[in-house]
Image (spheres, helix red, strand yellow):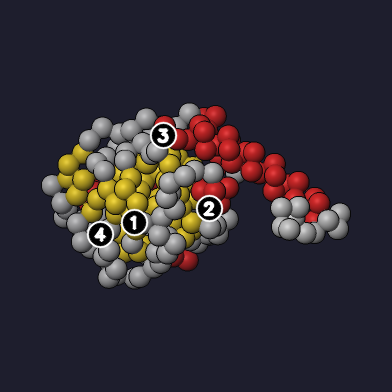
Amino acid sequence: MIQIESAPEVLPKEWIDRAQKLSTTLLSDCIDEPVVMNEEIKPCNPNSVVVGSAVTIDVHEGDNLAVHHAIYHSSPGHVLVVSANGYRTKAVIGELMAAAAEALELNGFIIDGLIRDYHTLSQASLPVFSKGAIPEGPTKKGPGTINRVIECGNRLIQPGDFIMGDADGVIVIPREKVEETLTRAEEKRTYEENRLSEIAKGNIRPKWLT
Ligand SMILES: O=C([O-])CC(=O)C(=O)O
Ligand SMILES: [Mg+2]
């Protein structure tokens, strides 16, 4: 049986547009709490960038029925964040599920576990983040939960949390901290752009390094 709670609100478009001009590194530098998921969770396609509101999914060991249901309980703007509870001998999703999610214009998948059909997913435009790949597929029996608090990548994820993933990994920020973190990260981006242009001009050593 799959327990399904209502889907969270998507993020304001303004937050998505601003975040897409930043990065997980800038944002994680600009918040005073741990936001980075376990470093093993990486994009299949290193060009992938995902920003969205977390739909949280907890699956039973080696099973993915809850993920199949979650795809059809989500909307454009949602990122499906899956806790596989450390299970590493079966994949959680593959290319068919990713194609369905892409056709429904969902934003992507973050999987604390493994996937399959890696070759296709490494070239797909839908962002898929995972700990790697394995051929063996999951059962589809349940149980599972959708839109309850989960643990993913050693972080607690609330439904509707701000999620961003890029080539460096994945971060999660509580909604009430997003506005301030975006503003601070924009200031840091300006500082870093200035540093790069100073380096290009030959002023290589930073002023703060005495
Ligand atoms: O069998 C599954 O549920 C996962 C899979 O390979 C696919 O989505 O292509
Ligand atoms: Mg498949």
Is 89 in front, or is 179?
179
Rendering coords of residue 192 (x, y %):
69, 48
Query: Which comes sooner in the sequence, label 4 or label 3?
Result: 4
Instruction: Report helix, strand or loop for mark 3.
Output: helix
Quarter of the C terminus within the rendering: bottom right
Rendering coords of residue 63 (x, y %):
22, 58
On residue 154, which mark appears? 1
On residue 166, which mark appears? 2
The type of residue carrying mark 2 is Asp
Is 175 in front, or is 5?
175
How far, Cα to Cα, is label 3 from label 1?
A: 19 Å
Please report the residue visible at 17 percent of the width from the left and 42 percent of the height from the top. 3
CB atoms of marks 4 and 3 within 8 Å = no
CB atoms of marks 4 and 2 within 8 Å = no
Instruction: Report helix, strand or loop for mark 1.
Output: loop
Q: Residue furthest front?
A: 210
Q: Is residue 168 left or right of residue 76?
A: right
Q: Is residue 194 above or below residue 183?
A: below
Question: According to the image, label 3 marks what residue?
Answer: 175
